[in-house]
Image: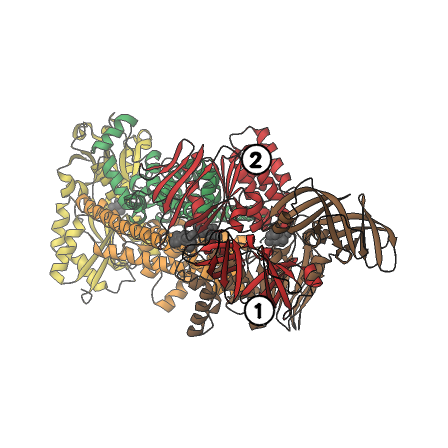
Chain colours: A red, B brown, C green, D orange, E yellow
Amino acid sequence: MELNVDLHYPLPKGGGLQAQFSVSLDSPRIVVLFGPSGSGKSTLLHCLAGLLQPGRGEIRHGDTIWFDASQGISLPPQRRSVGLLFQDYPLFPHLTVQENIAYGLRRWNRAESERSVRGWIDRFQLGGKENRFPAALSGGEQQRVALARALAPKPRLLLLDEPFSALDLRTRALVRAEVRRWVEEERATALVVTHDIVDAMTLGEDLIILSEGVILQRGRPLDIFSRPASPEVAKIVGVENLLPAQVILASEERVVLEVGKGRIIAVGEAPPGGRCFVSIRAEEVILERGRPAQSSARNRLVGFIQECIPVGAQVRVVIDCGFSLTALVTRQAVEELSLRPGAEITAVIKASSVHLIPTE
Amino acid sequence: MELNVDLHYPLPKGGGLQAQFSVSLDSPRIVVLFGPSGSGKSTLLHCLAGLLQPGRGEIRHGDTIWFDASQGISLPPQRRSVGLLFQDYPLFPHLTVQENIAYGLRRWNRAESERSVRGWIDRFQLGGKENRFPAALSGGEQQRVALARALAPKPRLLLLDEPFSALDLRTRALVRAEVRRWVEEERATALVVTHDIVDAMTLGEDLIILSEGVILQRGRPLDIFSRPASPEVAKIVGVENLLPAQVILASEERVVLEVGKGRIIAVGEAPPGGRCFVSIRAEEVILERGRPAQSSARNRLVGFIQECIPVGAQVRVVIDCGFSLTALVTRQAVEELSLRPGAEITAVIKASSVHLIPTE
Amino acid sequence: MNWEALWLSIELASFTSVLLLFLGIPLAHWIVISRWRWKFLVEAVVALPIVLPPTVLGFYLLMAFGQNSPLGAFYESIAGTTLPFTFGGLLVASILYSLPFAVQPLATAFAGVNPRLVQSSWVLGESRWRTFLRIVLPLSKSGIITAFVLSFAHTLGEFGVVLMVGGNIPGVTRTLSIDLYDQVQALNYRSAGKTALFLLILSFFFLSIVTYMNRKRQGAEGGTER
Amino acid sequence: MNWEALWLSIELASFTSVLLLFLGIPLAHWIVISRWRWKFLVEAVVALPIVLPPTVLGFYLLMAFGQNSPLGAFYESIAGTTLPFTFGGLLVASILYSLPFAVQPLATAFAGVNPRLVQSSWVLGESRWRTFLRIVLPLSKSGIITAFVLSFAHTLGEFGVVLMVGGNIPGVTRTLSIDLYDQVQALNYRSAGKTALFLLILSFFFLSIVTYMNRKRQGAEGGTER
Amino acid sequence: ASSSPTLAVAAASDLQFAMGEIASAFEKSTGSRVKVSFGASGSFVAQITAGAPFDLFFSADESYPKRLIETGLAIPESFFRYATGRLVLWVPNGSPIDVAKEEMQALLHPSVRKVAIANPAHAPYGKAAVSALQSSGLYERVQSRLVLGENISQAAQFVQSGNADIGLLSLSHASAAPMKEKGRFWLVPVDAYPPLHQAAVILRRSREAALAQSLIDFIKEGEGKAILERYGFTLSSEAK
Ligand SMILES: Nc1ncnc2c1ncn2[C@@H]1O[C@H](COP(=O)(O)OP(=O)(O)OP(=O)(O)O)[C@@H](O)[C@H]1O
Ligand SMILES: Nc1ncnc2c1ncn2[C@@H]1O[C@H](COP(=O)(O)OP(=O)(O)OP(=O)(O)O)[C@@H](O)[C@H]1O
Ligand code: MOO
Ligand SMILES: [Mg+2]
Ligand SMILES: [Mg+2]
């Protein structure tokens, strides 16, 4: 059993969304959709829910054809049994919190429906607000009600468009865990749009990178984060160091590259053509004092600190070592190594942390 | 010149918002409002904008009284010269992107108004969409237009309710930088509600923690993050290790505490009463192999790894060392130290990284 | 005060406006959701009574339902009576005459419901029809009230059609409008004045209560302004 | 076809509905935003013509503006003529008579505009009045069209008042409604039938174009359904 | 047309056909314009009382003009009985009723479900019809079947169009072209109801009193006289 998607949705002003992928429906699974603003994530979810009609292609859910342009088939949203959370999480303004959550449970018996609603109210910390109208809720409360409303009827496919965007850290973690649990208990499948890296890493086993209406990469979140397939993906997943490089020496399993005025060693094969991008996550750059010798397993680059920017509990350190390199270190390290602009420092990067991306 | 706020807004169903603070208006400044969902952040902004009338108290902006319950004064929103971005960033549906941004510039001369709109469209990467109606924009695009509309008239006080919630990493960084730049150029003051730790740290010089309608702490973001004043604040700013502890020895500048079945050493004064909370950020916990001797400057706690959870580019490691301790390390460290559940490991915590919070 | 005429008018207006809700709600709904390309023709037909003087309608009814016409003869063979000069005749005329006054506000209200809410309901498994009942209809409350009030009023104020096809039969087709007209034409100013004053006070009283209640209810449901 | 009567009717309906927009828009706006505790009384007065038969209105106008009344005498001393049986008299009567048909849809539309948008405009420095012009009014477009169409229609269909205060004077107060009524009385069925048919076709044609255009415009502005 | 003097005439609806002809004949001979409004006599009195700008009023009886003179709205000297009207019992051609034979009893014929008369509240023909019904003792039995035309023309139209089965109408309607061929009638005897002496007056407001007087004269001794006769009006010679 698989969800097979192969569609093209034309956008009125040029471009369009082109999506081709399939998701197994046999085991509980969360697929995360990740991509810049305007890349077509919401459009894709709306196509799957049956609210937008693709121009070409087909959507199959197991044995059921949901959409087929060539046969002129399009199952109405009611019959797709999906749960959809819109990005702007609209609630029915004339219904209370309780009534909103119970909306999709009309066919359930009364007791079960009430039990379910009760459960969601507790799980999403909405107690005491069950008889309020949406106008009297805060943004985050509204979003949780909308999410509960989408989950309560136990749809087979869950489509969540930025389900945690209005939630604070703690509530977000809690709600995220509930969604995760729900997917496993119900053995459901969920497609979740998110901007949040932590969401993307902790929520799903599968990540789809979408940009300008095209799927750029698909795979395990960790793989994509450390080994983006293209410079574009590297930028999208937030790789801080993406540097144009020139291969100057390629042995069996070592590649030496010229980056700016410096050199970097990577393991693996040299990319064809000699020119490529070097992708290094800032967390993988370690800073040390002193000027130790070069070794084959590690790059040791000496440079001067240009900037120290606190980012949450960590500090982003920008170093000029022939090219501009960004490292992300703890504040403790900053103190211990007395990192400050102008100071000389050695940046250590394991050769295996250097990922090479061929230029297209 | 200061913005002085001292108000109470009664919420229909119990509780209420109680806020008392002032912000200097003399230098460009961004104050971040941080707090759990439903804590009253939006309510506070709406009171400042003049859309809600507090029950008691007063609001003064420099020499101008904006609100004074005892005198029955309430300046209408039009005359407060604030820029407000609502949490749900509503746009005027009958106006194009351009017209929406230009809405507040009616009194400007035509050329200047056009130049300004053009500038915002470029800065917020909305090029090509200037003549679209809001219904044909993605969520993130809508949010950027709403933000531009609020900034364009150069208000003296900017009130932003989660201005980046619908933006992806890269766009968010870009827009955040633009807001920062704008505040400095215009020498304006901004109150920004956000859930995002990175926003909170990089955007403002001032952080206000709000919970259940009450201001819990106010100060420099870094201070609050590393030295939360109460367990509640510690939870809100996401301190992973918040452990009840008992003082067993307090010398001049060293405190020894019993935490669960283990011991921890902190610097500074012992809290009164002997009981307190120990607050340690996960990033400050360093993992090492081997069992080195105890020293006074560092806590070295031996334990067994219980869980390794990848979080973004980092890994959260939970260790049982007489109590449950969470560390946040790079994936590189995980590999090098071959961290996996069941393995024995030493957690190193500098005594100065241990923050003590008195129990109330 | 001619109670019979008052009662008749209220009866006619009530029947008409209630029947028009039943007729107008599905019709307006169809007009709003249909994507049929010739829909605008149907809309035009529904709107026709808007620009047609009531006397045109009265004329057609008289011609169509007189004994000499096939339709009239057919109706008579079934109902045993001709349609003009009966309450039924007035009802038919009123419904035609007030149709757009019900459909127009209904269609405006239905079209004004946020499509996101409608789609939310679809995705939650509710059919178009049940979505209409559970979401569109309750959210169009003020439009429905407007439709009811306007069609009631328009019927109550109906005069031309009644004059043409009513025949001024006491208790059957002599509505209050006609009765008052007769009183004035017969120069019974005193009696006409009394009737008018009574109606004025009654109406004012009734409307004050309705608008007052309406405000109360809104206050209770909407919560505070936020 | 009596062109004079057709023209008179259209003129009356146009003047009335345009004047009613000017009158009704501020009135409806006030009704929606005002927090005055006796507001409901004003609402009731505005709604009065809804439940008052037009002949009551006609009666009061005749009484108030007749030569024997002080008001009538005053008016005559200024205007040189009495108000009833003139075009001006019909206009005044029509405006009163159709007032709620304009105010009701307007108030419903104004009240339906998302308050967040109104507040957004205030915060951007626009006064209540300018916010009304720039935001509330354009977003109430369909309500305004409804108000215009319904008051136009209601005036066109006006018969009782015209008969009472108009006096059926050719070219001055003989509207199309009345003219058709007269033709039928004169047993000019052929001519009445022609008039009726002409109106039917004209109206249908006109309405088809309007609804068709309306749809076109909506399509252009709203973008695709999302 | 605006330059030529214009006469606004309010005429009882039994003059519906005759007055049209008279007006055009008068217009032709004088070059003036005549605008005629038809309606129930009582309605015109109500309108004139309220200030309706008519020059001349032709009633279907003589009490309404007298009332206008009493209230000072009409010129007493202008009062003129221009004709006497007659009431007829009229059925359309398709009717099974033989009115000539059954006379007033025709109203009780089983095929009769609706009887059209003018509204007695303000139309003299309506009053006459009610008197005729009362004097023949039929009023109570027929009452529930009465449909009232706003004026006598509408009553005629109800029968003629087949919406009512029989009607008590004016002889002038029965004699007019649109009805002549379409039905039969029986002339109700003059003693069954008070005579319908019809009078005209010139109104005080009139600014065209002289022209109005010439229209009266046109009927008194001019072409108008013959036209009225053709529509079944008997002419009374005495003025006042
Ligand atoms: N009706 C429309 N006409 C033209 N373009 C449209 C229309 N609707 C959406 N678009 C464009 O399609 C693109 C994809 O929109 P979509 O809402 O799917 O983006 P998204 O990935 O969800 O972005 P976000 O993260 O900002 O919500 C956007 O660039 C948007 O401007
Ligand atoms: N009209 C109302 N009646 C009763 N309670 C209300 C009303 N409006 C808001 N509240 C409550 O007031 C509290 C504060 O709301 P507010 O919108 O200020 O929260 P917030 O801090 O902005 O939360 P979020 O981050 O979720 O947007 C919430 O608990 C909310 O439920
Ligand atoms: O005044 Mo009439 O002619 O009896 O209707
Ligand atoms: Mg989106
Ligand atoms: Mg909020």
Tell me, for residue B183, which label it has, or none: 1
Q: Residue at x 50, y 53 (%)?
A: D43
Q: Residue at x 60, y 40 (%)?
A: A178
Amino acid at circle 2: Glu
Q: Secondary structure at mark 1?
A: helix
Q: Is residue B212 visible?
A: no
**Picture coordinates of residue C40, whole percent (x, y):** 29, 46
The local crowd at label 2, few if under 14, some if 14 to 19, many if 20 or more residues have their Cα within 10 Å, is some
Q: Residue at x 46, y 64 (%)?
A: B101
**Chain for mark 2?**
A
Q: Secondary structure at mark 2?
A: helix
**Picture coordinates of residue A72, whole percent (x, y):** 32, 37
* Residue occupied by mark 2: A184
Depth check: A16 or D139 in front?
A: A16
**Picture coordinates of residue C12, whole percent (x, y):** 39, 38
Tell me, for residue E15, which label it has, or none: none
Amino acid at circle 1: Val
| Quarter residue C175 falls in | top left
**Picture coordinates of residue D194, whole percent (x, y):** 19, 47
Question: Outermost residue toward the front?
Answer: A251
